Amino acid sequence: MARIIVVTSGKGGVGKTTTSAAIAMGLAKKGHKTAVIDFDVGLRNLDLIMGCERRVVYDFINVINGEASLNQALIRDKNCDQLYILPASQTRDKDALTREGVGKVLDELSADFKYIVCDSPAGIEKGANLALYFADDAFVVTNPEVSSVRDSDRILGILASKSRRAEQNEEPIREYLLLTRYDPNRVKSGEMLGLEDVQDILSLHLLGIIPESKSVLSASNAGIPVILDEKSEAGQAYEDVIARYLGEERPHRFIESKQGFFRKLFGG
Amino acid sequence: MSKNPQKMPNTSSVLEFKSSTFFSPILILHSNDLAAIEQSLQEKISLAPDFFKHSPLIIDVRTLNEFNQDFKVPEIVDMLRKIGLFPIGLRGGNDQQNKQAKKLSIPVDTGQEHENGAAARDKNSSQEEKPVVQGNDDSSAEHNSNNAGCQQESKATAAPDSAEKIEQSVVTTVPARSTLISQPVRSGQRIYAQGDLVVMSQVSAGAEIMAEGDIHVYNTLRGRALAGVQGNINARIFCLDLQAELVSIAGDYKTSEHITTPMQKKPMQVFLQDHALIIKEIA
Ligand SMILES: Nc1ncnc2c1ncn2[C@@H]1O[C@H](COP(=O)(O)OP(=O)(O)OP(=O)(O)O)[C@@H](O)[C@H]1O
Ligand SMILES: [Mg+2]
């Protein structure tokens, strides 16, 4: 049985797809057979970030409609043979995504995979609800700003009341916080919320802080999940996230600004 | 009370009839001035948008007819639907009005059996000076009862000078009990308790908790909390940290703008004293 992870946020553009690609690759690199599904019908971003956009033949909706088999639609990642991508359709309309259809595909994947990562679209509409409906775990991606925190709180309410686990009175979805695009300098200057402010409102299990980093954009331009860029802070931060998710204890990094650190060191 | 009231029971047949109660506010119209009614309703809705969104509503036109005020049922229904309410019944209408309602597939209640009670209620409500807040909740709609035949109404609020008033129609009384919530109540979630409500976790901004009795929050209260929603003026709200968007006791409310809590992160209580809403540290 696979563990189904939804990467969700409510608010758009906070780093869900970046995170989905990174954690799917992270899990696969650890030897777990992992599939990552793009639920963002009409936008199709995941395949770009995974660098497989030119190998897309069939998509998620073809599989739901029975026009292609899962095996035909799944794209094996070029960097890691344990990782498969199920791309979204760029052309179909969103109504093709149905609960039964999604359930069937996830069931079929479950037999063969260890982890299924669902990259949710933004919003709290149907697409987002479907992406989280079958989840066992939720990675709530939040930026350190008020509107993002608010939206995350809203998504947490939906996870707790509208998911399959909630509806069937099963053990609730495990919720984890991923604070992304964190910039300690801007936190210090008061432009951004600090970790404490965010946790004051969300009080979630913190899986990691992903610093704002230029390497994210260059990785996505190159079509390589940033977790493979081991020199970058964002890559390391995602590496930590996977280790913590798999049960390892690691201290949190990237909370303080380097500048601050040196200043402290030299008493400046 | 179950957190998932919408859950389908596991039954083998395709349908099942149950005698049950359904909470619905009753909108008693005192004027046929549609524009004034709409404006007054909008004001109330803005106080508790989540509360009134898609709220079913029974339209009571008895007063209008008593004073021979002219109106058309379809116009009232259109206006209510336009502002997001769902009229689900008409009462106190005459034959012609009832016919208009039926044409719109809106059930009609001739209201004969409550005539006396309603008259008495109208009288004392006009003396009250409480602002609004209350309505219905999905979670209470599922409440089953074995003596659904005996109707009883309790009213919660009325603005004395407004063109309409809303009141809660509760069919049958149920023994008060307390509801325990141990998970956080997140933005967009609503909880309604028929007795007391105890929340062990935080209540987020954008969440709404309501109880006919007291409310206890053993954490930070950031959302809206409404105690005594059926008119119990002795109800209280207790919490460990008051940062609420709105607190209300029996319809008397204060919004965050008027909640001054110098004692942040101190246990606080909210109660009514001589018709005034008091917010005070728990000594
Ligand atoms: N840690 C980071 N540092 C710098 N830039 C980042 C970081 N994470 C994400 N970004 C950038 O933010 C933008 C949005 O990221 P992404 O597409 O992953 O967000 P999303 O939540 O999936 O968006 P959508 O809601 O549109 O699906 C991208 O340009 C990405 O490169
Ligand atoms: Mg995305």
Image (cartoon, helix red, strand yellow):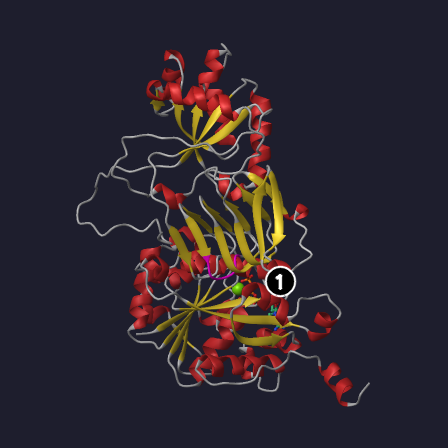
Horizontal side of residue B32 vs A39, given as left or right: right
Of B29 and B102, which appears nearest the observer? B29
Place of residue A240 in the rendered image (x, y in percent of width and height, measured from the top left) = 53, 82
Element type where label 1 sits in the image:
loop
Q: What residue is drawn where x is 33% and y is 30%?
A: B151
Residue at the limit of the structure toward the left, as seen here = B12
The answer to which image quadrant residue A101 occupies is bottom left
Q: Visible in this render: residue B169?
A: yes
Residue at the limit of the structure toward the bottom, as seen here = A266
Place of residue B12 in the rendered image (x, y in percent of width and height, measured from the top left) = 17, 49
Q: Label 1: which residue?
A: B265
Horizontal side of residue B22 vs A210, given as left or right: left
Placement of A255 over or under A132, stated as above or below: below
The main secondary structure of the magenta stretch is loop
Of B178 and A90, which appears nearest the observer? B178
Marks counted in the figure total 1
Horizontal side of residue A220 vs B16, given as left or right: right
Placement of B246 over or under A42, stated as above or below: above
Residue at the limit of the structure toward the front, as seen here = B283
Q: Visible in this render: residue A122?
A: no
Horizontal side of residue A260 vs A180, given as left or right: right
Residue density around tag 1, few if under 14, some if 14–19, many if 20 or more, within 10 Å: some
Pointer 1 indicates a residue of which chain? B
Find out if the beta carbon at label 1 lies less than 8 Å from the nearest ligand 1 atom: no
Q: Amino acid at mark 1?
A: Lys
Is residue B30 magenta-colored? no
Of A182 and A120, which appears nearest the observer? A182
Magenta residues, start to end: B199-203
